Amino acid sequence: MAFQYILDGIYNEVIQIENTGKVADYIPELAKIDANKYGIALVDKYQNVFTKGEALEKFSIQSISKVITTSLIFSKIGNDLWERVGYEPSGNSFNSLVQLENENGIPRNPFINAGALVIADLMLEHFENPKAFLLDFVRELTENPNINYNENVAQSEKAFGYRNAALVNFIKSFSNIKNEPEAVLDFYYHQCSIEMSCVDLGKCFQVFANNGVIPKSDKKFLSTSKCKRMNALMQMCGFYDQAGEFTFKVGLPGKSGVGGGVVAVFPNHYTVAVWSPKLNKKGNSFYGLETLERLTTETSLSIF
Ligand code: GLN
């Protein structure tokens, strides 16, 4: 497949579209980003990397980190995970509180904030030094030892994180958070502050395209069944209340973050990452979705 030619064409088409999105400003540090950044990276099954635009520039991965922490906990505790968090799409915004009361503090899935906070709690429970462990793991997947937390972004989110604080306290009132809310929030804000480029992100998600095997080392990180389930979660829940539309238009499992990143996985074929900070009303990158819809339509390479 002539991926370079395809990415060049899509990029040139998409930059002509008026971008009606807006940069997330509820985390003040994120509002400082140049709104016009736009990069794409595609990694094929032979680990060839194709790029266009600002594909090597780092950005805040935000909620994309939820896939990584969930996979770490799933690999560690297996199906016991589903006693703490569900696997159904929420149909609500990423930071919604409304479903928790009727569901006894069991979040609908691990990719809405409520679920990711329970996963963060599990990370504190199951790993001795979860921050260092997560960073090492991300460095292994990206093959990039320079991946780091952005302390300014983590602190900026902490300073204004009233909603996440409400979520974690509310869930704790149902006893589904075991650690101190402060500690859970601190870990969560750090995982969201990880910075990567599109190339890093494409490489990072290769493990989900490769039946749970880390391509570089051939290490089986997730069983084939667990890998299937991670991709299923991304398909159903990766874009919150736009997950249906993403499936409808793009047809791949994927995940977005409010830093403007979007990553998608075509099992046994490729991973693709797009970064463009202006977000649509659902909190997903406007150009990110435009790019991926064109990619799967023009190449006919979607899981459907
Ligand atoms: N850190 C962000 C938050 O909790 C992550 C949200 C996102 O990327 N959708 O609000």
Image: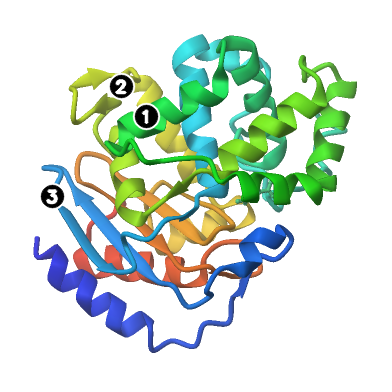
Identify residue type, mark 1. Answer: Lys
Q: CA distance from mark 2 to mark 1?
A: 6 Å
Which amino acid, mark 3?
A: Asn
- Residue 108 seen in render: no
Mark 2: C-beta under 8 Å from nearest atom of ligand 1: no
**Labels 3, 2: front one:** 3
- Above or below, 293 against 173 in this view is below
Q: Mark 3 and mark 2: span between their CA atoms?
A: 23 Å
Q: Which residue appears at 28% of the width and 66% of the height?
A: 295
Mark closer to the chain start, 1 or 3: 3
Residue 240 percent coordinates (x, y): 61, 51
Secondary structure found at label 3: loop
Camera-nearest label, 1 or 3: 3
Residue 85's mark? none
User: Mark 3: few, some, or many residues within 10 Å (few <14, many ≥20)?
Assistant: few
List the residue tagged with mark 2. 224
- In terms of secondary structure, where does tag 1 sit? helix
Residue 102 horizontal/vertical position (percent): 86, 32
Q: Residues within 10 Å of mark 1 (few under 14, many from 20)?
A: some
Type of the residue with mark 2: Thr
Rendering quarter of residue 123: top right
Residue 48: mark in rendering: 3
Picture residue at 48% right of the left edge, 21% below the top: 133
Give the residue number, with chain letter if any, for mark 1: 228
> Does residue 220 lie above or below 169 as drawn?
above
Say if disc 1 is inside 8 Å of ligand 1: no
- Residue contact at pointers 2 and 1, CB within 8 angstroms: yes
- Which residue occupies the foreground of this view, 53 or 5? 53
